[in-house]
Amino acid sequence: MFRTRFAPSPTGYIHIGNVRSAIYPYLIAKQSDGKFILRIEDTDQKRYTAGATELIVETLRWLGLNWDEGIEVGGPNAPYFQSERKELYQKYALDLIKKGRAYPDPTPPETIDEYRKSDSAKKIPYLYRNHRPEESNLPPEEILKIWHEGVPLRFKSEPKNYEWHDEVMGDLKTGPEVCDDIILIKKDGLPTYNFAHIVDDYEMRITHVVRGVEYLSSMPNYLALYEALEIDHPKFVSLPHVLAEQGNKKLSKRDGAKSAVDYKNDGVLPEAMLNYLTCLGWNDGTEQEIYTKDELIEKFSISRIQNSSARFNETKLLWQNGMWIRKIFDEDGCDALYERTTSFWPETADSYSDDYRKQVLSIIYDRLKVLGDLKTMTEYFFASPNIDLDFLTSNKFLKKFSEQELADLLRISVDRLQKIPEENWNPDKIQNALNELFTETGTKPAELFSLIRIATSFAPFSPALHLTAHVLGRENFLSRLNSTRSALINDEN
Ligand code: GLU
């Protein structure tokens, strides 16, 4: 039974790459009937942003990544905000002090800066252990006294080689040049990420640490801490970067990457987001592209996580979202999809019945990339469109006709369509009438269809004409054709 965690820092924004660091550990835990834990790493108060934790919670809940232990739900290791676990870290720090592996450091920041500059001028790698203050040699009682006066506590490192296995990156090793005296507890009494996560992962009995490769360079220091604390380390699963669509940069907020919640607000379905992000850097070796959450839980495997960067591709995400929209409609029915659309209709739809909106949805769903498309794509179902004759006459199939010819075609169409009585106004009858109209007018389907479609919607796209006509209703449809015809005639005069 595996125990994994998502341990974000509440800095205000979870980009897509970060979300993957929540999905993978979730899947790993679930496929072993294990536990997924949500811990908030908020010990760096300078980076803290109000509302960020809520955003994390919203994202995970939206994606259905429900955690078994963590903030809000509690658990045996509560509290799950690191800022509320200060005493625990102090206990582990004390252990290191007693073992002679931690020391208080009163060195002012300016002096540390000087060390850095002088090492760089001498072209030697900057390592703090070469500048240890004399306090580093004091006995534990003395160390405790100085530490309690409010100075940072540092790890007393040993230059060593390290070899370890990463489940994604393979066997790795480093030389002694990367081991250093990292800060364990800051002046404000809160631990650094470097120290806190080790204590917490151990206390929470985490079996797999899943996180970005950016932490790999600190691994020797983490391994040194596990050693000094005499505790076992979990398995390490380092996820390669997610690159932005263009160039070689990591996906980042600064470069305009949207957050998961932005996509939620656009009308991306959580199923699609989960599907897309899981497959961003993982595959099961088949051609399959659409996976349900249950399938992902079943099929996900750490051994098939790619060890090279994955590239974010919004077009693919939206394509998969379109597939998911169709899947839900086709497999679970119109009502199931309709339930998801509540906040995505144009305002003008408010006064229409659920039934009417479902009819609209059922003829347009297969054209939606995001549910937000409903706002722009369905306006003309809820309000008469503004007649825009330029839009009509510049259409590539219609520009060869004069306005009078277009008006005449509309008159003939109205004459034919109004022969269908109200009770027979259904897609089949409408389709038959339209077919007859080609013969009667000698136009090509693209010409007549474009004319009738634009004359009743003034939209760049619409669902199949007979379906649109049916949903709009006989009276409404004929009246729109007539209005456009009148406009064409008046324009001519
Ligand atoms: N708090 C770290 C972050 O937000 C998490 C790293 C980890 O998962 O250990 O980047």
Image (cartoon, grey):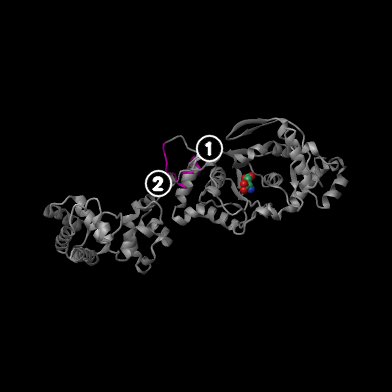
Q: Is residue 487 located in the magenta-colored stretch of the structure?
A: no
Query: What amino acid is found at the position of numbered circle 1 in the picture?
Result: Ser
Helix, strand or loop status at disc 1: loop
Helix, strand or loop status at disc 2: helix
The residue that disc 2 covers is 319
Q: Is residue 187 left or right of residue 311?
A: right
Query: Can you tell which mark lies on residue 176?
Result: none
Total number of numbered discs in the rendering: 2
Query: What amino acid is found at the position of numbered circle 2 in the picture?
Result: Trp
The residue that disc 1 covers is 309
**Mark 2 surroundings: few (<14), some (14-19) or many (≥20) residues within 10 A:** some
Residue 469: % across, % down: 24, 60
User: Of marks 1 and 2, which one's residue comes earlier in the chain?
Assistant: 1
Residue sitting at x 30%, y 55%: 460
Residue sitting at x 74%, y 35%: 121
Residue 51: % across, % down: 59, 59
- Span highlighted in magenta in the image: 287-303
Front residue of 335/356: it is 356
Residue 486 appears in the figure: yes
